[in-house]
Amino acid sequence: MQLLPVIEKFIRARNIAPTRFGRDAVRDPRFVLDLRNGREPRRRTVSRVLTYIDGQSQGDR
């Protein structure tokens, strides 16, 4: 699974800064920038990010 496109779509839809997303999702403001530069997240990190996105999306329903 490609995580970066999912994150990019989420931050565009929410109009939030990549650093804000990183802080909120995984406590790392450089997370999105690092992904853009080729960082490969661990499975546990991917799970945390997807759980965060799902939790935020639950509020939209």
Image: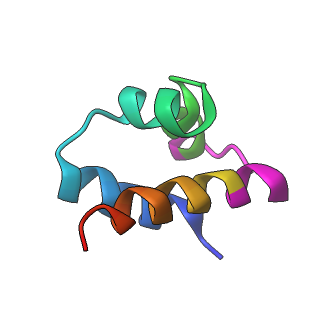
How many marks the image carries: the answer is 0
Residue 40 on the magenta span: yes
Estimate the x, y position of residue 38 in percent, counting from the top left. Answer: 64, 46
- Residue 35 appears at what percent x and percent y? 58, 44
Residue at image point 54% right, 25% down: 30
Relative to 18, residue 27 above or below: above
What residue lies at 50% left-to-right and 39% top-to-bottom? 32
Q: Measured from the top left, where is residue 12 in percent x and y?
A: 22, 54
Residue 5: horizontal and vertical position, in percent?
44, 65
Residue depicted at x 74% and y 49%: 45
Q: Quadrant of the C terminus?
A: bottom left
Is residue 31 covered in magenta?
Answer: no
Q: Please state if 11 lies on the left or on the right of 6 as rendered.
A: left
7 or 53: which is nearer to us? 53
Q: Judge whether 20 appears above or below 49 on screen.
A: above
Q: Can you tell which quarter of the image residue 50 is in?
A: bottom right
Asked which quadrant contains residue 9, the reply is bottom left
Is 39 on the left-hand or right-hand side of 15? Answer: right
The boundaries of the magenta stretch are 36-47
Q: Residue at x 40, y 27 (%)?
A: 19
- In the image, 9 versus 27, the foreground residue is 27
Quarter of the figure that contains the N terminus? bottom right
